[in-house]
Structure formats: structure tokens, C-alpha cells
Amino acid sequence: MVSSSSVLMETNRIYEGDLSHIVSFSGGKDSTAMLLLLIEHGYRIDDIVFFDTGWEFPEMIEHIKQVEDYIGRKVTVLHPKIPFSDWMLRREVVARKGENKGEVHRIGEGWPSPFRRWCTGQKISALHKYIGKNAVQYIGIAADEAKRIESKAVLKKEVRYPLIDWNLPESDCLKYCYNRGFDWGGLYEYRSRVSCFCCPLQKIGSLRTLRRVRPELWGKMLEWEIEMEKTGANQGFKGWKTVHDLDRRFACEDRQLDLFETAK
């Protein structure tokens, strides 16, 4: 944990000025710990901004409300202009090059991927537009995730990473939040990340657990994929596999496990 409040306050003086001071709040353990510590040590905060993708766990939305009650102020919630589900399933995609340039060549962007992270692009664009350039932006990246900061500083704004300054790793951030009564409805008991439930970039183990623990959300993903197949938007979910491919794989693994348990 933070070793000395004097370190915090000294860093705070660096952040003072005429710029707006904005907390970029994802709602996860790191950004929650950052926000609470900033408030606890008297940092100036003009706004707290959360981008609701529409794909959040219900527990995350409840967590945002709990944070608001705890700190006694509102969190500004941004939404995409076009719902992500419409972007993925129903948006007209226009060809940018080739013989059909300028024409609609596909309906729906399909699942995001490491090379087509249209969802991340929409989120970053909305946050940058709202925050503007004349701002100090606080981003909750933990000390043991410092390698992630390389792609963050895009606009001409002051971007600060307090958790890195304070040498706070992810594990300490989670403990800090738990000690103050935040538990995300138990999400961190079976997930290392609590961002979009349908993210194709999550580990295969997280997807397996999602299917088992949250069948209603897994079922929604299967429904979306059926709609994608009708329009040709589906370009694979993870590793060129579809959600239905993974569903069959997980079902097969469950049957094998049942046989193993029966044979004991």
C-alpha cells in the first residue's frame, strides 16, 4: 500500500493548475482504488467519467451506484451514440477501398478482435471528446501493469497514472477496495477482469467460467451470433472459433469431467 501520505500530497501539487482534473473511471478494482485514494488524500477532482458500453456485468452498474453513495457525488456516465450491439450486428459497413469503395459491403462489424477493436476505438473517442485537451486525466493502471501506458497518451493533455507513482500493484488495489466494502457482487472471485462480459480478448478460462456461472449472459452471446450468421458479420470470436464452437467444446469437456467423476 501507499507508504506515506506526504508522497501523495507532493505528487498532488504537481497536478494543480488551471486544467480540469478528470478521473477516467472504468469501475474495476484499479480505477476504484485510484479514485478513493485521490479523494482520501485531497486531490482536486472536477469530474469522474465512466463509459457504459452496454455490455457491462449488471454487478458493475450496481458498483457504480455504490461508489457514488460512498463518495457522495455523481459519476458522469457516457454512452455510445450507436449501441454496441447495433454496431456489431446491424450497422452498415461501407467499403473503404477496392471496386466496391463507398458501397455497403457488410451489415454489422461482427465480434471485436485484436485487429478490429472497434469497441475500444469508440470508447476512447467518446472519452477524448468529453474530456477535451485542457485537462489532467487520471488513469487507473496498476504498477505491475505499467507496460500498458505506452498507447494511452494520445491527445495533448496531461495524463497521470497515480497507481504507478504510488507503486500499487493490482493485488493491493483489490485488497484496498475489499477493505472498504466493495466486492462487485463476487465477480473477482471467478474473474481477473470485470470489463465487458462478452469480450473476445478474455482468456479461455474466463469464457469457460462465464458459461458455467452466468448462463444467461452466455446465452445472449449465442443469440447475437445467430443474428450475425444471417448477415455475414461473424468473422470469428476467438482464435477463429465462434461462440458456438466454444460452447460445443465446453459441453464436451463437461461430459468428460462427468465421466471422470463417475469413474472415481
Image: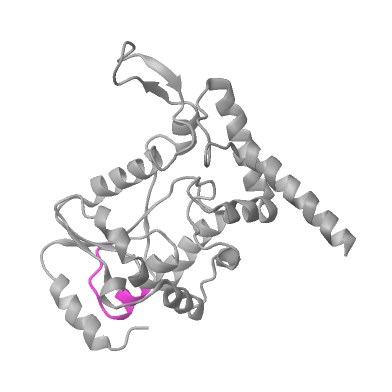
Location of the C terminus (image quadrant): bottom right
Magenta segment: does it hold 168? Answer: no
Q: Is residue 38 above or below residue 5?
A: above
Residue 262, x across and y down, in percent: 88, 59
Residue 109, image x, y percentages: 44, 30
**Quarter of the N terminus within the rendering:** bottom left
Where is 176 relative to 220, above or below? below
Give the farthest residue toward the right: 263
Q: Give the side of residue 226 with respect to residue 28, left or right.
A: right
Q: Residue at x 50, y 63 (%)?
A: 63
Is residue 40 shown left or right of residue 108? left
Q: Is residue 259 above or below residue 14?
A: above
**Image color mode:** one colour
Count how many numbered circles sit on residues in the image: 0
* Residue interval drawn in magenta: 36-47
Q: Is residue 20 left or right of residue 73?
A: left
Left or right: 4, with 77 as reference point:
left
Q: Give 204 or 76, whichever is nearer the viewer.
A: 204
- The location of residue 124, given as percent across then percent down, is 31, 47
**Residue shown at the point (26%, 78%) measured from the top left:** 42
Residue pictured at 38% horizontal, 65% vertical: 31
| Extreme residue in the top direction | 99
Residue 164 image point, x, y percent: 29, 72
Write the residue at 44% across / 63% down: 28
User: Residue 40 in magenta?
Assistant: yes
Q: Quadrant of residue 183?
A: bottom right
